[in-house]
């Protein structure tokens, strides 16, 4: 079992950038496919981005494609989400998630472990 801890959220103006981090407490993340999801008030949790356990393949929601980049460090201890050209509609709590089956994907049901979330607020 792995515990995930997100950081890096905050308040940013539209057009600005933020980088979120997700660390595995007590172990590396090299055996997991990883994903980022977000949930805005009154809305369901939605897929943002995913990365394969090897780091070779990445996947993005259409709403963030070209603006967000998911990556993991070479030691596979930390997952990142670089968010550029932020929009007010990006405002949400962002969660990282881990899938020990290494499949990952865009469905939240495919992930077994979740962080507590970090708030991202984008002002217009």
Image: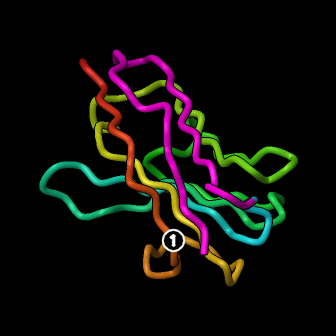
> Whole-percent x and y of residue 92?
29, 43
Q: In which quarter of the image is residue 11?
A: top left
**Quarter of the image where the N terminus is located:** bottom right
**Quarter of the image where the C terminus is located:** top left
Check the image and report above or below for 73 versus 29.
above
Judging depth in this view, the residue of 40 and 1 nearest the camera is 1
**Residue 22 covered by magenta stretch:** yes
**75 left or right, relative to 94:** right
> Whole-percent x and y of residue 56?
83, 59
For label 1, the residue is 113
The colour scheme used to paint the residues is rainbow
Start and end of the magenta stretch?
Answer: 1-27
At 51% from the left edge and 78% from the top edge, which residue is drawn? Answer: 112
Q: Quadrant of residue 2?
A: bottom right
* Extreme residue in the front direction: 26
> Which element carries disc 1, helix, strand or loop?
strand
At 38% from the left edge and 42% from the top edge, which residue is drawn? Answer: 118
* Extreme residue in the left direction: 42
Dot 1, crowdedness within 10 Å: few (<14), some or many (≥20)? some
> Whole-percent x and y of residue 66?
59, 38
Q: Quadrant of residue 102?
A: bottom right
At 79% from the left edge and 53% from the top edge, which residue is drawn? Answer: 76
**Residue 67 covered by magenta stretch:** no
> Whole-percent x and y of residue 83?
53, 32
**118 left or right, relative to 21:** left
**33 left or right, relative to 119:** right
Check the image and report above or below for 114 versus 22.
below
At 69% from the left edge and 47% from the top edge, which residue is drawn? Answer: 78
């Amino acid at each position: 079992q792995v515990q995930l801890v997100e950081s890096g959220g905050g308040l940013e103006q539209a057009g600005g950038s933020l980088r979120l981090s997700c660390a595995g407490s007590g172990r590396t993340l090299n055996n997991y496919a990883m994903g980022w999801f977000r949930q805005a008030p009154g809305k369901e949790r939605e897929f943002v981005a995913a990365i394969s356990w090897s780091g070779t393949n990445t996947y993005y929601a259409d709403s963030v494609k070209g603006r967000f980049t998911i990556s993991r460090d070479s030691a596979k201890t930390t997952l990142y989400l670089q968010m550029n050209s932020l929009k007010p509609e990006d405002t949400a709590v962002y969660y990282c998630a881990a899938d020990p089956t290494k499949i990952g994907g865009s469905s939240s049901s495919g992930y077994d472990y979740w962080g507590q979330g970090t708030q991202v607020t984008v002002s217009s």
